[in-house]
Image (tube, rainbow, N blue to C red):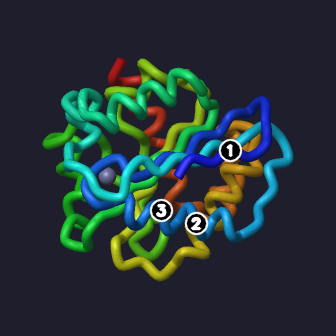
Amino acid sequence: MFEIFGSGKPKRLFVGGLHGKEGLVTQKVFSELVKSNFTVKEGCLIIRNFSLKTRYVSTLEREFYNTETGKKLLKLIRSIKPEIYVEFHSYPSKSYPSLTSEERRKTKGVPPLIDLSKGLLFGSVSPLIRKTEFKKRDFCALLEIPKKFTGYNEVINLCKIFIKARNREEIVEEMEKIYPEQMKQVQRNYLEFYSLKI
Ligand SMILES: [Zn+2]
């Protein structure tokens, strides 16, 4: 899937199907989003689902960016230079504890993902690309969607916030209205990443 809506800035890029069989779930999310008849009032949105099934290499590993999909992803990010970038992933329920555990700081060097609602997890993208490919003020997020997920409306509503907003601040402001407690942690993680790990 490769679709473009609108034109100009701000540029928004949604990607999925980065590894394993996640593309089956992310393709479904993107199809639902397209069917939901959103409008891009300002700037553009590019949606790219890379593959339905491919080898699994974690985006936290440098090796990922040498895989076929990893290379295509970097090329796309570099040609578009999005101000709003969202990676869509999918996980089996057995991975929930490790994705949301404080241990992740030690074992993976990244903060735990935050459960927005019903197992829909939110966090930042891989530190391997956050600073090299994006500016600090860009909005870069990662959504982990449970494989057996029924709350598609929630994801679509979140996508609509990303599509309507013009920048990071507007997205955070809207998300705080829906997820006040969760967003406090999101902001703490963002500040931690930029002040402590340079
Ligand atoms: Zn993934």
Describe the element under mark 1 as helix, strand or loop.
Answer: strand
Q: How far from the left and from the top, in percent, is residue 187?
A: 51, 43
Looking at the image, which residue sits at the far left? Answer: 107
Residue nearest the observer in this picture, 137 or 36? 36
Spatial CA distance of label 1 from label 3 is 15 Å
Give percent across and percent down for residue 64: 24, 35
Residue closer to the observer: 149 or 187: 149
Q: Is residue 78 above or below residue 95?
A: above
Where residue 31 sits, quadrant-wise, is bottom right
Residue drawn at (25%, 73%) of the image? 93
Give the residue type that dot 1 points to: Ile
Quick check: 132 above or below 116? above
Q: Is 97 left, or right, of 3 in this rendering? A: left
The C terminus lies in quadrant: top left
Between discs 1 and 3, the one toward the N terminus: 1
134 is higher (above) or lower (below) than 185: above
Q: Quadrant of residue 177?
A: bottom right
Q: Is residue 10 left or right of residue 3?
A: right
Residue bearing mark 1: 4
What numbered label is drawn on residue 27? 3
Q: Is residue 136 left or right of residue 102?
A: right
Q: Tell me the crowding category of disc 2: few under 14, some 14 to 19, or many 20 or more residues within 10 angstroms, Cα based.
A: few
Residue on which disc 2 sits: 31
Q: Is residue 154 visible to the viewer in this orientation of the structure?
A: yes
Question: Element under label 3?
Answer: helix
Q: Tag 1: Cα neighbours inside 10 Å, few (<14), some, or many (≥20)?
A: few
Residue 169: x %, y % from top left: 69, 39
Label 2 vs label 1: CA separation? 13 Å
Verify CB contact (< 8 Å) between mark 2 and mark 3: yes
Residue displayed at 25% across by 55% down: 20
